[in-house]
Image (cartoon, grey):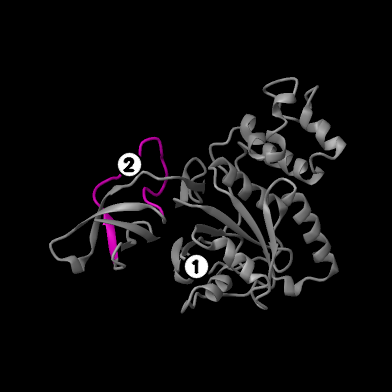
Amino acid sequence: MYALVYKSTGSWYTVKTEDGKRWNARTKGILKIDGITSTNPIAVGDRVKLEFEDTEEEGAMITDIVKRNNYINRRSPANKYQHHIIAANLDQSMLIATLKDPKTSQGFIDRFLIAGEAYHIPSIIVFNKSDLYRKKELDLFEERREMYERIGYKVLNISVQNRTGMEEVEALLRNKTTLFSGHSGVGKSSFINAIVPGMSLKTQDVSGWSGKGIHTTTFAEMFDLPALSARIIDTPGIREFGLVDIPKQELSHYFPEMRSRLNDCQFNNCLHINEPGCAIKQAVEEGGISMDRYVSYCMILDSIGRKEY
């Protein structure tokens, strides 16, 4: 029998079989996937094979993992040399960001987009809390929207509090499995409570003294959206999105506006910093590539390999 993994707590998993029944399950021995080394062998969104023990009430045993269509990961919080698979078998990822209370940095947004590009998962950026925005934030949103839409990303401005823009987001979720991510405090749990019938996920305000979000989600978890024939995967609030397995020479490949120009550089190993004949730097000077995105690229490039990265 096969099932979908809805929640992973490290050693036990919540799975749902095709008949809609949920089971607590654990792995049988050590499961290894060729070519993938991670701190968690099974991720939310995985399709797994089950065997039942003598008494089904005691739960089920996961004996195999069906080959993944894709997965997305980040650096393990416990070990910078290992990675942690956030979710598998995704149709798209959605970053919930804010421009106020707390403010999501452009660097965080760009790291999220790079991860999506690296694993061929389309990304959407949703700015929440528009009900708090004044002219300063609205002007910044327009800048961000123009910058990201110009390179092919969908960008929305919504307010879960006022339900402004929610219908457009729900339309994007329809018939898809979507990864939800973002800093703690941006309103992920409030959003899920608004679109999942009967949900009452715990929500907390932003910490007053630090201006940063307070973690409310401990483990990744998948939820069904029956009205939309969709699923969403909620992830723990992430303070940093540590990228893994991306060498400096490849970073520019995950910036769409740079990728299309790489063959025009004089040197094929160009890092687009000090090299002569660089098509990327020329495009920045001519306005074809956003200066903000180029600065973000330089900062991420500089951080690769550093201990705190």
**Farthest residue, direction top:** 267
Coordinates of residue 47 in the picture (x, y in percent): 35, 52
- Tell me what residue is drawn at x 68 percent, y 41 percent: 300
Q: Does the image show residue 8?
A: no
Coordinates of residue 213 in the picture (x, y in percent): 63, 67
Mark 1, Cα crowd under 10 Å, few <14 / some 14-19 / many 20+, is some
N-term-proximal mark, 1 vs 2: 2
Q: In this view of the protein, which residue sits in the foreground, 74 or 263?
A: 263
Is residue 282 shown left or right of residue 195?
Answer: right
Q: Is residue 149 above or below residue 197?
A: above
The answer to which image quadrant residue 57 occupies is: bottom left
Q: Amino acid at mark 1?
A: Leu
Q: Does the image show residue 142?
A: yes
On residue 32, the disc is 2
- Tell me what residue is drawn at x 48 percent, y 44 percent: 83
What is the CA distance from the residue labelled 1 to the residue labelled 2? 34 Å
Q: Amino acid at mark 2?
A: Lys
Q: Which residue is mark 1?
A: 228
Q: In this view of the protein, which residue sits in the foreground, 72 or 100?
A: 72
- Please identify the quadrant where the N terminus is shown: bottom left
Coordinates of residue 293 in the picture (x, y in percent): 75, 44
Q: Taken as a whole, is the magenta stretch helix, strand or loop?
A: loop
The answer to which image quadrant residue 145 occupies is: bottom right
The answer to which image quadrant residue 204 occupies is: bottom right
Which stretch is magenta?
23-43
